[in-house]
Every structure is written in C-alpha cells, then in structure tokens.
Image: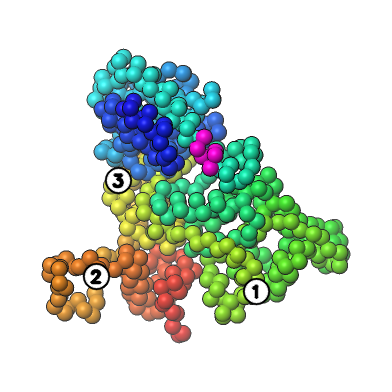
Amino acid sequence: METQLLTDLTTDLPDGVRLQRAATAIRQAFACDAVGLLMLDGHDTLHLVAASGLAHEALGRRFVVGQHPRFAAILSRREPTWFDPGSVLPDPYDGLLDDRKGSPLPVHDCLGMPIYHQDSPWGIMTLDALTTGTFDEAARARLQQLGLMLQAAVRVTGLERDNRRLRLLGTSQQGIERIGETTEILGRSEAIQALLHELDLVADSDLPILLLGETGVGKELFARRLHRHSRRSRQAMIQVNCAALPESLAESELFGHVKGAFSGATADRPGRFEAAQGGTLFLDEVGELPLGLQAKLLRVLQNGEIQRLGTDQTIKTDVRIIAATNRDLKANTQAGLFRADLYHRLSVYPIPIPPLRERDRDVLILAGHFLEFNRARLGLRGVRLSYEAEQALRQYPWPGNVRELEHVISRAALKTLSRGASRDQVLTIEAELLDLDIPPAADTLPTAAASAPLQAPAGATPDIPALNDIPPLRTTVDDCQRLAIRQALAAADENWAQAAKALGLDASNLHKLAKRLGLKQRPR
C-alpha cells in the first residue's frame, strides 16, 4: 500500500482520483469493511470526498461535527482514536455500510485519525471493521505512520487544484482564497462534472451567460457558482425573479426611480442594476419578462447605462448578466413571445443544465444530502433508504428534478416516523413511502406491433434484440411518459388538472412536460 501511495504522489491524477485510490488501498491493507476520507467545510461540517465500502448516498451527506461525538473525538486528537466495540457513542455510518444497507451496525471496531494540511485540520479518515479486534495496537501504529503520506496526498491534490485555478484566473492570492470554498452542487456523474468544468472555464469572463434547464434543476445554484468563481466575486450578486415582477412596477424595480416619479414614490430609490454595480445581476425566469420591458432591458445592455424612472439623467452600469429560463427562448422568439435581439444579447454563452434523470447515480448522492438534513431536523438517530427505495429513485423520471426529490425525501421521512418508529432507531425508508409512479418497462408497453411475430435480425436471438436495435434510454423514458400522460388524460376525459393529480404532478409541470414530449392540449 505504501508503494501505491508514493507512486500516486508523483503521478498527475484528476481531482478526487488520488484520494479515492488511497481510500481503496487502505481498506485492502487493513482488511476492513469501510474507509472514508472526510474534508472539513469551514470548522464545523464534514463531507466525504472519497469512500470505499460505504453506500453511494453517503457521498451526499454533510455531517455537523457537533452532532456526531465520534467525529468530534477524532478531530480533538492528533493521534489515531480507537472506539471500543462497546462504545455507547452513536455511529454516523449506521445503515450506510454498503453490504448492510439500512441496518444499524452491530458491535464492531472503529478507528479514526485527523488529517492536517499546513498545520491546520483538513479533515479525518475513518475505518470500520465488522470483525472486532481488527484494529489492534499494531494496526493503530501503522495508521499513525501512514498519516504523513496521507497528508502529503492531500497537499499534492490541493496544490494541483490551486495551480490549475491560477492558470485559469491569471491571478494570485485572491484566486487561492476561493478554491477551498464549498458549493451545494452535488454530484459525480460525467454530465455534472463536465458542466462544472465548463462553468469554471467561463466564470472569469464577463460574457453574458444564459442557463437553460427544466424546472427544479437548480439554476440559481449554478448562477451563484459562476459568480463565486468570477473576478466579481467580492461584489454582490443581485437576483431578480422576472416571473414575480408586477408589470406596473418592473421598470422601477430594475432601474430605480426618483421622488415623485409616480404616486407613492416618496423618495429616490436605486434599482437592481445599481445594487449590482461591479458585481453580477441574475435574471431568473427571464423568459417571463413582458415585451415592453424587454425593449428597455435591451437598450440598457446595448448602451451600458440606465435611467431611473422619472428622470433623464443617465447612470453608467458595470454588471455581468447571468440569465436563466426553463422556456425554449429560441422557439419563443419565432412565436413573437420574446425579442430576438434580446435573446441574442443574453445567449452569448448558453449553458444547458442536465435534468436529474440524465445524471446517473447522482440521485442517490442528492437523496443522501436530503436524508441527513431531515435526520437533523427531525432529531433522528439515523434515516436511510432501502435497496428497493434506491431502485425506485433511479427508475423515476423526475419531471420536477432536484426540487421534487427534496420534497419526496422530506415527505417520506415524516411518513416513516409517523408509523410509530422511535427517534432512537435507524429508520429505513421503503419504496412504497416514496409515492413514486414508476413508468412501466419498455417491453411491457402496449404497441401496435406487440401482437406481430418477432422477426429476429441477423446476429440476434428471438428474445434479445440486436445491439443496434436498442433505442437510447432517453427515448424509452420519453415513450413511457407519453403513454402515462395519454392514459391519465383518457381516464380524466381530457381534464388536465385531474390528470396531473392522478400522476402526482403539479398541473403546470404536466403542461411543460407534455409540451417537451410533443403532446398538445386539445381544445374542449
């Protein structure tokens, strides 16, 4: 194991890979059941950056040190801390070991050690073994020796990240100060990692950004990340919800007004553009702006100056624009609902945000994050997902994306507790408590060709289609959704509100989903 760690220290590896390889090697070397490397966010919260033998949902959890005595004890000492198998301190990993999913841990060995970087605590490493006696005196001494190599791995990983960021930012200490900053964007899928890399590349430019994505994907979080990694990060980011702006007050809200500009204007008031001076203005739901205001916004973006309502005096502006929408603005320009010239001004750099259903196992990481939040909120010893619940989360298409997932997990945790379980137990959320309508599998969908004899193409068996004949997963999911919507509408006599209720969706979300799938509402 020592040889591998030394080799990894001198090898250029992607972020996270070096630490993940270290966690896997340590688990094998100590013949234990789980190893976790947890990094401190600030001074009071730990999160897993690498793990071996722990359930996938654990990667999304944030552990407040003050709520977990074992973690607090590990951080309080420089040397390894061993917990007696009979320790009464609650184990943060109860129900999170991969091969004991959802079950409290039996009596077992637990060992932890703090990791330091530049003489400051960076985080901790934990080792768990279901066989008591695994971590004897010799094992603890060996772990102590490995501490310096682990700290070197942490240091090398941090330095490489710092150097990459400095090359991108072309700056010095200011860029380094932002590197350790945490973000609420959770996920390890290829789709989200590619997106975050693109965001970091474009963040330091002053190009207008247009974030495109379905309802609930977290566009505001991505906007905040862009601002946080930009050269304007020391100034304010001002958010405007364009959908909530009353048309009669929208101009005053954006550009400000002077005393007497209209009835009720008793004093001069700056608008959102002035509040964002030197920083970022985030126009959320920009597709909802009325056409009249779109023309005035376009003029501001073209000229770089505003006029408060009620005066001819101009004010120079210096703001970076980030806009977001769940609408197809390009289609809206063709329909005359959005100005084409404003669209081109806002979409200098469009960034599509992938929906949750395209992010692979990120749904489990996000579910773990919301589970830990509800554990603390409800005062529970622990709350976990059963294997069946995990499968249900991965099969559901998530039309409401991350926001819908948050509500599903919170509701299921309350339902589990309401069934009479004790807060001192590790609660397991079963699939039925998630209340998810899982679309039927593609091979069970009724089709016109279902009754026709199956002709196997060359190179395929009668039961297994040829590889080239397997449709993309997105196509299969879309077909399932279309069928479910059509069936619900037929049963509800084309009443969209009743169909939405039957499908467990908000009516507006059903209309948006149907529009994306090419289903049109019939006039009644």
Q: Describe residue 286's horizontal placement relative to residue 62 as left or right.
A: right
Type of amino acid under label 3 = Ser
Mark 3 and mark 1 in contact? Answer it, CB < 8 Å: no
Looking at the rendered structure, the kind of residue marked 2 is Asp
- Residue type beneath disc 1: Asp
State the image coordinates of residue 119 (x, y, percent, origin top left). Answer: 54, 22
Residue 505 at x, y percent in the picture:
43, 64
Which residue is disc 2 drawn over?
469
Q: Where does the magenta region start and end?
A: 159-164
Asked whether residue 118 appears in the rendered view, the answer is: yes
Quarter the C terminus occupies: bottom left
- The span from disc 2 to disc 1 (Cα, nearest Å) is 43 Å
Instruction: Please tell me how crowded label 1 is: few (under 14), some (14-19), or many (20+) other residues with Cα within 10 Å.
Output: few
Category of crowding for the residue at label 3, using alpha-carbon neighbours closer than 10 angstroms: few (below 14), some (14–19), many (at least 20):
some
- The main secondary structure of the magenta stretch is helix
Q: Which residue is drawn at 38% across and 33% down?
A: 8
Is 263 drawn above or below residue 177 in the view shown? Answer: below
